[in-house]
Image (cartoon, rainbow, N blue to C red):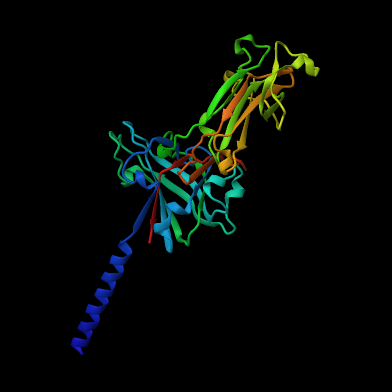
């Protein structure tokens, strides 16, 4: 009998040792993989430092090593900087689903990026560590460099694009003032040309009160167009082919100067409002109109050219017309980020910017 008991003890110890060893063999996948050990070229905020909602779409091509495994944690690494990031805590709610489309087909509407069966994988406080200054480009995935979100229970990944949906809020008494997470920025800018044609009651502007963010002019992205005008006044963005100048007076308007329409025919008209900044110190320029125009994820969009010009109905004035051309190359990041306020239903979408993420899985 003693020999049997000894044998059983040996088997039990061996089984426990094997189980412990298997449990310790966690796997890690970093996206984008080229930044597994090296700092990327951009920064992003950690949700919850302010009231923020962030969706991260990750294409299936980035996650092949995780198929058939369960995600046990998601980590954000700090960005390299010769500066200490003071820690604290954030309150996060995290949902994961298989997205209904690829990152290049993402929407600015949060609900449209969520799959059919979203799973709440975390809800509660997350520690944001105090992280000492880092010189150089190497940043290790050590506890004082990482915001770690445990996934309980683990999320089984079976393939397809992932949608990670994070809603974050500050924690009273444990607020984080600044903690920059590492992110990547793919440089594929389109181009713009100022065609003029604008006028304004404010001579200092010379009619140049609209702009387009060139880095947003990519296939699958959302072209961001901005204009400044009469506070709470009607703003109309006209998009179409470039045309020879057409004086507004010939169209029955009474503009404050030599305004000219440089877009014809008017293929797209987008109405919105010039909203002033709630801070009076920043409201001196009038109101701001801000629109996002989805660029389709099709080959025909590459290198395509259009023109945008704004109309301020209150002033009966046109902005400068801007001819814009979409980048000839398609983003290869296969990731997208959509960011907005925690209570918003829509955010700003980027298919060329995304945080560096490490998944723990097994």
**Is any atom of residue 355 visible in this view?**
yes
Which part of the image, by quadrant, shows the N terminus? bottom left
Picture coordinates of residue 55 (x, y %)?
Answer: 52, 46
Name which residue lies at 32% across and 43% down: 144
Asked where in the image residue 89 lies, by quadrant, the reply is top left
Name which residue lies at 57% across and 55% down: 115
Picture coordinates of residue 36 (x, y %)?
Answer: 34, 46
Name which residue lies at 67% across and 14% down: 199
Above or below residue 188? Residue 67 is below
Instruction: Work out which residue is located at the far bottom of the displayed protein and give it.
Output: 1
**Is any atom of residue 148 visible in this view?**
no
Query: Is 52 in front, or is 254?
Result: 254
Asked where in the image residue 267 lies, by quadrant, the reply is top right
Left/right placement of residue 241 relative to residue 52 reads right
Picture coordinates of residue 257 (x, y %)?
Answer: 70, 10
Above or below residue 181? Residue 152 is below
Picture coordinates of residue 350 (x, y %)?
Answer: 52, 39
Which part of the image, by quadrant, shows the C terminus? bottom left
């Amino acid at each position: 009998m003693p020999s049997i008991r000894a044998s059983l003890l040996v088997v039990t110890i061996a089984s426990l040792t094997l189980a412990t060893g298997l449990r310790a063999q966690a796997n890690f996948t970093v996206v984008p993989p080229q930044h597994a050990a090296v700092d990327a070229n951009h920064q992003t905020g950690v949700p919850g430092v302010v009231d923020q909602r962030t969706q991260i779409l990750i294409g299936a091509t980035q996650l092949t090593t995780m198929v058939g495994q369960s995600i046990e944690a998601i980590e954000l690494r700090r960005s390299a900087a010769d500066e200490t990031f003071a820690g604290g805590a954030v309150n996060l709610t995290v949902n994961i689903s298989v997205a209904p489309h690829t990152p290049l087909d993402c929407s600015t509407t949060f609900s449209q990026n969520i799959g059919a069966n979203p799973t709440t994988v975390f809800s509660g406080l997350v520690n944001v560590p105090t992280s000492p200054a880092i010189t150089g480009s190497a940043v290790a995935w050590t506890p004082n460099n990482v915001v770690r979100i445990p996934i309980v229970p683990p999320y089984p990944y079976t393939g397809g694009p992932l949608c990670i949906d994070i809603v974050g809020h500050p924690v009273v008494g444990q607020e984080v003032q600044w903690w920059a997470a590492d992110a990547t920025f793919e440089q594929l800018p389109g181009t713009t040309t100022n065609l003029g044609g604008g006028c304004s009651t404010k001579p200092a502007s010379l009619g140049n009160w609209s702009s387009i963010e060139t880095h947003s002019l990519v296939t699958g992205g959302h072209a961001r167009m901005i204009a400044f005008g009469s506070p709470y006044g009607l703003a109309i963005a006209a998009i179409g082919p470039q045309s020879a100048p057409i004086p507004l007076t010939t169209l029955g308007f009474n503009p404050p100067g030599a305004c000219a329409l440089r877009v014809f025919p008017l293929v797209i008209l987008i109405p919105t409002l010039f909203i002033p900044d709630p801070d009076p110190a920043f409201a001196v320029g009038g109101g701001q109109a801000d629109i996002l125009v989805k660029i389709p994820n099709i080959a025909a969009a590459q290198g395509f050219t259009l023109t945008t010009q704004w109309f301020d109905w209150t002033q009966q004035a046109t902005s400068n017309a801007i001819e814009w051309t979409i980048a000839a190359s398609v983003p290869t990041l296969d990731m997208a980020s959509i960011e907005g306020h925690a209570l918003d239903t829509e955010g700003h979408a980027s298919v060329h910017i995304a945080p560096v993420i490490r998944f723990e899985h097994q």
